[in-house]
Amino acid sequence: MDRPLPRSRRVPTVAWVAVGLALFLGALWWFGLGQGRRLRVDQRSVEISTVRSGAFEDYIPVRGRIAPRVTVFLDALEGGRVEEVFVEDGAKVSRGQKLVVLSNTALLLDAISREAQVAEQLNNIRTLELQLEQNRLGHRRELVEANFQLSKLEEQIARREKLVAPGAVAEEVVRIMKEERRYWKARRDLSKEAQGTDLRLQKAQLAQLRRAGEQLQKNLTVARSNLDTLVVKSPIDGKLTALNAELGQSIAPGERIGQVDDPRRYKVQARLDEFYLPRLDVGQTAALADPPLTLKVHKIYPQVTAGQFTIDLVFQDEQPPGLRRGQTLQLRLTLGEATDALLIPNGAFYQDTGGAWILVVSPDRSRAVRRTVRLGRRNARDIEVLEGLEAGEAVITSPYTSFREVDQVVLAP
């Protein structure tokens, strides 16, 4: 005889599996899909700052290095062998003071050769001038002789023509005398023409020789000045640095043997990121805190090397005493005027987000949610907020190294 079995009160295994799956999906929705990618951190391990309204000071910190404003390089223009060295590296020198003496046999021989050429040309000019004067005197002698003969013949012809009629003088004699008169007239005219031609040609030749002589004299002056460059002198009052000249050393033409710095006038050289190149212009100011001084941008070098460019700044007033070459100064370089803006402290988060987003803290400080923002200018202290935040909101400004892939941070007390 069959008996009905009692119903078991245990929940079927399938039901338990369904409940577990539902709980898992709920947790997944909470931690992943519903609330985004979350990370739990200790509230004390992050830095929380408040968005505030204030004046944004558009400046950047700059570390500059002291350098002489005036530096004159000493180059061996012609080169040679070092014969004498009068000063040592680092010594104070005055303008015109002898520093190094070089010797160059080729330059010396060249100067001697040019002197001989100039002397020869001068002799040629004097010889030509003498010839010109002799020719002039010879032509004058010819003209005097011709005029004398013509005058004498005119007188004789006049007397004999009167004696032809009575038969005292034959007509043939008068005719011969008239022929002789024509000869002397032609000779006089030829002498005048020759005198003019010789004078014109010899003057042109003399002018050419004089121009050649002047050119040779200039060449001689250049050769002598080249000899003068073998004595290296200080071009200004200052301090001699980087001297590279030893007795007996051969210096090549154009080789640098030192430089003279003016210690009375200094400038500050600084290197900036190429990002600031379009925002910088000559005349912008920079402030030095200790002692309180103002500098201005004097020169901008547009060449960018390794992502940076160089600027020169000069002191607007008297430079502080005790400056030394190579000394560093901390400056605040002003890029623009102060303007009212929403501000957040400049923190390490910017390097991780690039200013595209930020973690905004809830009013109860229990969590922080990722939010897209648009940030503007930065200085060493503040960042300008353009969009996405309001005054009074709190944000995390500490490094985002662990927050790059999360949408929400749970702040544990």
Image: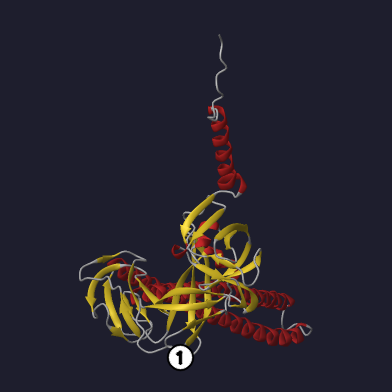
Quarter of the rendering containing residue 284: bottom right
Taking depth in this image into account, of 410 and 213 the one nearest to the observer is 410
Taking depth in this image into account, of 298 and 338 the one nearest to the observer is 338
Identify residue for label 1: 318
Residue lying at the far right in this picture: please name it: 165
Quarter of the rendering containing residue 78: bottom left
Amino acid at dot 1: Glu
Residue found 59% across the figure and 42% down from its top: 26
Q: Is residue 274 left or right of residue 390?
A: left
SS class, disc 1:
loop
Taking depth in this image into account, of 312 and 224 the one nearest to the observer is 312
**Coordinates of residue 220 in the picture (x, y in percent):** 40, 74
**Coordinates of residue 215 in the picture (x, y in percent):** 48, 72
Residue found 74% across the figure and 77% down from its top: 171
Quadrant position of the N terminus in the picture: top right
Residue found 48% across the figure and 74% down from its top: 61
Instruction: Say few, some or many: other residues with alpha carbon within 10 Å of mark 1 (under 14 / 14 to 19 / 20 or more).
Output: few
